[in-house]
Structure formats: C-alpha cells, structure tokens
Image: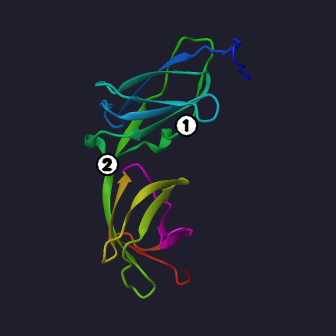
Amino acid sequence: LQIYAGDTTTVEIPYEATVRVHGRVQTKTDSQPVAGGLVDVSYGSFQQSDQVRTDADGRFEVNVLPGSVRQQLISLPDKYAHWTEDQDGWRRPVNVPDNVDHFDLPPLELVENLKRTGRLLDTNNKPIAEVRIMFVSNNRVFSGTITDAQGNFVLQIPESVQIDRYEVFVERDKPSIDAAVITESPLVLQLPKER
C-alpha cells in the first residue's frame, strides 16, 4: 500500500463466510467429558488456526473456513495428564462443507496410558544413563522419557497402541538409534554394536 501525507488511502479487505463448528473431547471407553482441554483447530491456508478450551461438558465451538479442518489436543487438565489422544483420530482432516452454517466435528477421544518400566543396556550389558527413549507406533512418534543413572525408565504408553520400535537419542543433534528388544517382560532394550 502506498500512503501519502495529506491523502486518503482506501483499502478493501475481502471476507469469506465461515462455518461454526462444534467439537467435543471425551474418553474413548465411556465417553466422559474432558473439561479444560486446549484444542487447536487449523483450517484454510498455512498457519490459520484457533485455539479454544473445552467447557464442563468437554465441548468447544469455533469459526472456520470451509474445506479441510484438523483438530488436535494441545494440553490436558491435570486429571488427564497421563492420557493420550486416540491414535485412530489423530490429526485426521475433516472436510467442512461450504453450504452450511454449523457443522459437527467428530469427537476427540482419549485413551488411558499404561506405565511400562524398562532398562536400557549397551553391548556390554552396562546401563546407559541420561538418554532419551521414544516409542513409535504406526509411523507416529510418541513422547518418551529419559533413563536414570541405572539405565531404568518408565514409559507412558496408550493402552490401544502396538509398539513398532524404540528410538534412542544418545547424542544431542544426532539421529536416533533403534534399540533391540532383548526381553519383553521385564522390558530390556539394548543398543546395537555400531553406533
């Protein structure tokens, strides 16, 4: 825009009609509402999104542009701090039509995490301390934990998730290393010889 002293500059700002979408965050097993969750709803062009908190019934509303819409949980209340968004609905786009005023999004469902303890060893069966372990399921990387001085760790794993592999980050700014599962119960992981 060119703006000159003493002149009036007229600007046209085009607006597009939006759709009011309604969503809900709930537990998967018994559909209990999750109040106080922060949900990010993205739509339209790059970086267009709104964040909204769920009410006492786990519901939220926001205006979006028609087309592809994604919803994702950003944070959860303390009561559900160790729960995870169900893998089946994670970041799946929903097509919102342009010929409606209101639209219901599918619910975001939470599954409870199960604690799984384990130990990480090197090739000499010595514990590896203070490294990060993540677990991968269906090409989705789940946040993990850091081993203690004895190589022990505790993972919070969604009960519905089948783990494909464990990734270990030994050095900062270096790629992860896939650990081998030596035993499942108790869970013992071991890094390969060449690192």
Dominant SS type (magenta): loop
Residue at disc 1, secondary structure: loop
Residue in view at x 45 percent, y 62 percent: 134
CA gap between label 2 and label 1 equals 22 Å
At label 1, counting other C-alpha atoms closer than 10 Å, the crowd grade (few under 14, some 14-19, many 20 or more) is few
Relative to residue 31, is residue 130 depicted above or below? below
Relative to residue 144, is residue 6 depicted above or below? above
Question: Which disc, if any, is residue 92?
Answer: 1
Residue in view at x 49 percent, y 38 percent: 89
Tag 2 residue: 82
Residue in view at x 59 percent, y 35 percent: 47
Query: Where residue 120 appears, x then y in whole percent?
Result: 39, 75
At label 2, counting other C-alpha atoms closer than 10 Å, the crowd grade (few under 14, some 14-19, many 20 or more) is some
Quarter occupied by the N terminus:
top right
Query: Where residue 132 appears, x then y in whole percent?
Result: 42, 67
Nearest to the observer: residue 175 or residue 141: 175
Query: Residue placed farthest to the bottom in the image?
Result: 124
Say whether residue 164 is magenta: yes
Segment tinted magenta in the rendering: 159-179
Nearest to the observer: residue 172 or residue 119: 172
Q: Amino acid at mark 1?
A: Arg
Say whether residue 131 is magenta: no
Hey, which quadrant is residue 149 in on the image?
A: bottom left
Residue in view at x 72 percent, y 19 percent: 4
**Image check: 33 left or right of 131?**
left
Query: Where residue 68 appears, x then y in whole percent?
Result: 61, 29
Q: Amino acid at mark 2?
A: His
Quarter occupied by the C terminus:
bottom right
Hey, which quadrant is residue 27 in on the image?
A: top left
